[in-house]
Amino acid sequence: MPRWLTDHGIAVVSPVLLVAGWEWASATGVLREALFPRPTTVARHLGQLVTDGTLERHTATTLVRIAWAFAVSAVLGVATGLAMGSWRRLREALDPVFAVVYPIPSVLFLPLVSFLVPAGEVAVVITTAVTSFFLVALTTMHGVRQIDPLVVEAATHYGARGWRLFTAVLLPGALPSVFTGLRLGLGYALIVVIAVEIVAAGRGLGAFLWLSWQVLKVEDMYAAFLVVAVLGAALSYGLAALRARLLPWVQDVAER
Amino acid sequence: MAVATPLALLALWEVAARLALLSPQYFPPPTAIAAGLAESLVAGDLGEHLAITVARLAMAFVVAAVPGVPLGLVMGLARPVRQAVDPYIAFLFPVPKIAMLPFLLILLGVGEPAFVLTGALSAFFQIVISTLAGVQTMDPRLLEVGENYGARGARLFRAIILPAALPAIFTGLRLGLGLALVAVVAVEFIAAKSGLGHLVYRHWQMLGTVDMYGAFALVGALGLALTRGLRALQSRMLTWQEDPGRL
């Protein structure tokens, strides 16, 4: 047996056993096949949805929304967080607002946003971006604030100020926290986009999932859930891997 | 200073709404919202919906924490368990739990168990992962010291491992409660016929904006009270260690 398998034996065997057990149970009627279709049935159905393009269309819609929301919240969040970390006055002014608004679940912003912009993609994207923005801004601010003041002092003694201080000291110093914020923000964006799609969109994985529940197309539900799950895992671990690859010296302050 | 900015923003909103710079239909003045909020708390059913949301949240939290903390501890202490369970935790943790709602609805029917369980699942994975991290990242020297003083088994667990992991466990519970609030309110918004999340949805659909903002503000107050309260409780109870995860 290869060493890798002896080390990770259980980790591989336990999911395989689970799927096999499920297959057996719904084939023999221990589980109701109407609610728990066999994994092989789901896999076949998934293949069908891929070939006829249904899944691709919904996944693409969701991904585009997440990408926009993530881009908006990353750019505005990092900028706001850096500014709040650097200027005490701004931090003191915004802190109470953030404290009140940040814990409000994003979906609730949908009505508010829908009053401000016409319903449609823009409203979905803005709603999705709200909580991610706060997360990115707050973690970035903490990142700036935990920079050793000695380092900042040393840099100013060597003549770094303004833009120079910012790019040479503050930004690199806050980078680990910024990354944590971006990773958490991306995770939140996925949660919110699915919820918003369930409520207010005709397309996207959340809408597809909800619609298949309403008409009880159970295989579609499993297929949609599987794609959402894989998307979640891919976004979360993909971003961590990307950080490890591009910025190996930067540590995520709260890995996982 | 701490209240100046929010007050200034509210005053700005008030003036803009009164001068009809903002459509009062969509953005009623804050004083009108506050008056409506007070009225429906006293005379209306707002208090009832608040109680329903809090009850769901409390149930979800208990259902998540009671198995979550022990599972995290066992995973941290027993390697085979960790290897067997970790694939599922790692796979399901980043999945939006709201996507599990349809499955719970067909399994349990449309009703409280499905709503509560969606909230519980949101908190559960966070609690397991934080607890596991608390055990795994404890200083091995502490274990050594304990063993050298003759502590093993239950003794070692109670005197060394649990206190060392407690700050991380508490952080997991706090983050989990926050995630449960997000899930419970979202579920109410989407599927339930009661609770603060549902109120926001209903008043949005009927354009009862005064009541909508009232329920919205109440959710904000609930979130603020929970995050602030738990953080204060954490620094009070666990004075010997710093919070490993501030957010």
Image: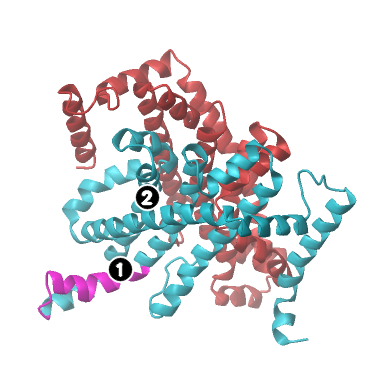
Chain colours: A cyan, B red
Categorize mark 2 by other alpha carbons within 10 Å: few (<14), some (14-19), many (20+).
Answer: many
> How would you classify the magenta stretch by its main secondary structure?
helix
Chain of the residue on which disc 2 is drawn: A
Is residue A22 placed above or below B148 in the rendered structure? Answer: above
For the residues labelled 2 and 1, the Cα–Cα distance comes to 21 Å
* Identity of the residue drawn at 73% across and 65% down: A15
Which element type, helix, strand or loop, lies under badge 1?
Answer: helix
Q: Residue B130 sits in which quadrant?
A: bottom right
Direction from residue A11 to residue A247 in the image, left or right:
left
Mark 2 or 1 closer to N-term?
Answer: 2
> Is residue B47 visible in the rendered structure shown here?
yes
Amino acid type of the residue tagged 2 in the rendering: Ala
Question: Is A40 or A143 nearer to us in this picture?
Answer: A40
Report which residue position mark 1 lands on: A174
- On the image, the x and y values in percent for residue A196 come to 47, 42
* Identity of the residue drawn at 17% across and 78% down: A154
